[in-house]
Image (cartoon, rainbow, N blue to C red):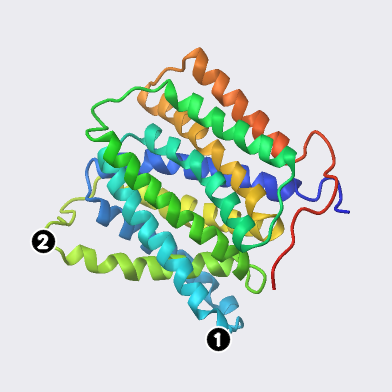
Amino acid sequence: MQPRHSHFFPSLCLVLAMFLWGSSFVAMKLAFQDYHPMVVIFGRMSVASLAFLCFLPRFRTIHIRRQDWHLFAVMALSEPCLYFFFEALALQNTSASQASLITAMLPLLITIASICLLSERASKQTLTGLFLAMGGAIILSLGGSANEQAPAPLLGNFYEFMSMICATIYTITVKRLTAFYPAFFLTAIQAWIGALFFAPFLALPQVPLPVSFLLVPMSAILYLGLAVTLAAYGLYNYALAQMEASKSSIFITLIPLFTLLLSRILFNETFTPLQYFGGFTIFFGVSMSQDFFRISAGKLFRYRT
């Protein structure tokens, strides 16, 4: 039986990662106001890539097994490559708060994929917490209204859903890879491949390059590269190596809450009583799913070798 608090530190890492990811919607929306989305995404990947070069001596001792090359390719293609491509299209058509709502669907997608592909089993308490948290995320975002930042919300939300499909594939792939490779190394691979993937987009004629240094978008790019791409993915990959994919994914329902909180601070958005109730429901569902109210009756994870 696992110790009562064996998941406390990974859970804390997940909460911090979700806060950083929740802030990324706001940061990207701010950067997109002045710079083309492909410029912003390439910039964040480049910043993270340069930061990871400091750890290159430590990575040289890591040997990639031949049978894992296809998993690395799937991981990088799903996220950051296709994930950020769809998310850029989403944030051009919908608001940050509406895009964050779609992320509430990700835990359910990951849970289904984990049961089918990783032979994980979820208890009734975990599933109850999952649906409570997802319901809270939906209630939380229903209080928001469309504005000038969401010219085509239906199309934008569809693109965000496609990015969630990519995130599901990414999570399942990383769960397999963290059994053999450090989480920080996997995060570095993502950043390097992501920078190479988005670099050719800068040569397209419809992608205008920046002609001046603007404080807000450049600060947002640095924040996205260091705090979100480097730190958040590192925290998430570490936590994913310590606990079940289906249980760690439930924390993703915190993203809409953090996004709306930051949107209120930066854009003066107000909360309705319904949104406060939705936020409480998210926290309650996440707490229940993580067995904070009682010790789990047994081991819930069984990895297929």
In the displayed structure, 223 sits above or below 179; it is above
Q: Amino acid at mark 1?
A: Arg
Q: Can you tell which quarter of the image residue 287 is in?
A: top right
The residue under the point 39% across, 23% down is 144
Decide which of tag 1 and tag 2 comes sooner along the chain. Answer: 1
In the rendered image, which quarter contains the C terminus?
A: bottom right
Label 2 residue SS:
loop
Q: Are marks 1 and 2 in contact (CB under 8 Å)?
A: no
- The residue that mark 2 highlights is 205
Q: Is residue 219 visible?
A: no
Does 25 sit left or right of 198 as displayed?
right
Q: Amino acid at mark 2?
A: Pro
Residue 95 is situated, as x and y percent measured from the top left of the image, at: 32, 34
Q: Name the residue at the front extreme.
A: 116
Q: Can you tell which quarter of the image residue 65 is in?
A: bottom right
The residue under the point 61% across, 24% down is 280
Label 1 residue SS:
helix
Q: Residues within 10 Å of mark 1 (few under 14, many from 20)?
A: few
3D distance between C-alphas at marks 1 and 2: 39 Å
Between 34 and 143, the residue placed more toward the observer is 143
Residue 193 is situated, as x and y percent measured from the top left of the image, at: 40, 70
Residue 66 is marked as: 1
